[in-house]
Amino acid sequence: RRSLGEELVRGVLPPLLCSLFLFNSTFIMAGSSLDSKKGSRVKIIGGSHNACSGWIDKSRFPSNDYTPVIVVKKKGNREQELQTKVKHENYARNTKIKPAVNYGQAVLQQHADINELLNTLVRKMAQCELSGATDKSNKNFSSIFINRLCKARQRQEVKGSKALWRSVKFGRS
């Protein structure tokens, strides 16, 4: 029995299906065949397609956990449109990024991996029972975060020339 890929290569399947390739439960379609399926623009902000842009896929229905999307992935010098799905919390409909008003926003906008890690952290912290939480406990969370960030900065500076630094462009002009 031949796989779907072998069937496509050998030309056994109809030509219409030959423009569709199966790749890890994500459909890759060639050219403009996806244009009619594109809905509103989205920015992927988490998951395996983090930092990609794309569109809501109007041809499929969302589930309780996932939204069908068409994302643009870059491979070398080429761009490829993929039909896939992302968790509801992993995309934002408003793709127009407002200029950062502070350094923290600039870091999160320019480093999608840090933004995703922060989203994961706050989701996990939100799972903690909050029945005893007060405004004072929220301030405690903030102070814990600030203390740990300061310690991490100190460790980073001690590394000297071996430290890895990320570039962040921020400044009011």
Image (tube, rainbow, N blue to C red):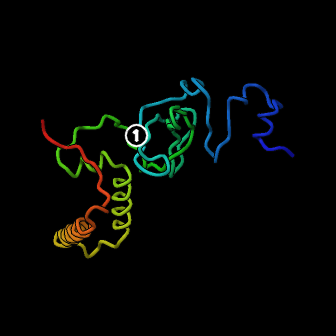
Residue at left 52%, top 36%?
76
Q: In the rendered image, which residue does mark 1 sit on?
A: 43
- Eyeballing the image, is 103 above or below 140? above
Query: In the picture, residue 34 is in which quadrant?
Result: top right
Under circle 1, the secondary element is strand
Picture coordinates of residue 105, whole percent (x, y): 24, 48
Residue 145 visible in this rendered orientation of the protein:
no
Q: Nearer the viewer, residue 105 or 129?
A: 105
Residue 159 horizontal side relative to residue 34, left or right: left
Residue at left 79%, top 44%?
3
| Label 1 Cα neighbours within 10 Å, binned few <14 / some 14-19 / many ≥20 | many
- Eyeballing the image, is 6 above or below 108? above
Residue at left 73%, top 29%?
18
Q: Amino acid at mark 1?
A: Lys
Residue 133 visible in this rendered orientation of the protein:
yes
Picture coordinates of residue 61, whole percent (x, y): 55, 40
Residue 38 horizontal side relative to residue 136, left or right: right
Residue 4 horizontal side relative to residue 62, left or right: right
Query: In the picture, residue 21 is in which quadrant?
Result: top right
Q: Nearer the viewer, residue 154 or 147?
A: 154
Picture coordinates of residue 8, whole percent (x, y): 77, 34
